[in-house]
Amino acid sequence: MFMIARSIEKNRRRKVLMHAALNYALERRRLLVKLSSVIISLLAEEKRIVNRSCRRLPRNTGWWDQIWQTFSDARFKKTFRVSRPTFNYIFDNIKDDITHDTINEQPVSAECRLGICLYRLGR
């Protein structure tokens, strides 16, 4: 009887060890599957172009586009401290230097840049 009990106990130990080894192998396999799926998803992720801009609100160019052209010659000279022909002469000479090509957003027109510069310098 003692030998039978001992044999049964050995079989139980063997089964417990086999189950432990099997559970370890399954957990390891699950971990590898999770890890590989994360790596594949990171590698397969599309390169997204994110339009990043420091501006939170759209730029308002209405003043330059609409209002400054309606100024009389006296108002133009008072605002920018130069006459219209002088403004056009300066603009024709420097427009290539102050024109910007930007990727992120619509650039301010070169005319508007000069107008802002003259306005600020006049103040």
Image (cartoon, grey):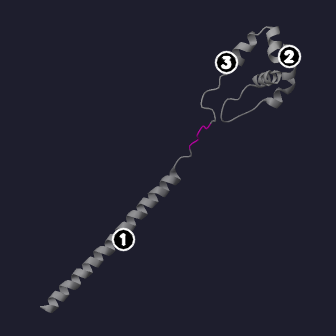
Q: Secondary structure at mark 3?
A: helix
Seen from this angle, which residue lies furthest left? 1
Mark closer to the observer (3, 1): 3
Q: Is residue 49 magenta?
A: yes
> Which residue is depicted at the point 58% across and 40% down?
50
Dot 2, crowdedness within 10 Å: few (<14), some or many (≥20)? some
Dot 3, crowdedness within 10 Å: few (<14), some or many (≥20)? few
Residue range highlighted in magenta: 48-52
**Quarter holding the N terminus?**
bottom left
**Residue 69 position in % (x across, y down):** 75, 12
Q: CA distance from mark 1 to mark 2?
A: 84 Å
Q: CA distance from mark 3 to mark 1?
A: 69 Å
Dot placed on the residue nearer the N-terminal end, 1 or 2:
1
For badge 3, the amino acid type reads: Gly
Would you name the residue on which mark 3 appears? 62
* Residue 19 drawn above or below residue 110: below
Would you name the residue on which mark 2 appears? 82
The quarter holding residue 119 reads: top right
The quarter holding residue 15 reads: bottom left
Q: Identify the disc placed on residue 25.
A: 1
Q: Secondary structure at mark 1?
A: helix
Task: State yes or no: discs 3 and 2 in contact (Cβ < 8 Å).
Answer: no
Closest to the observer, 88 or 75:
75
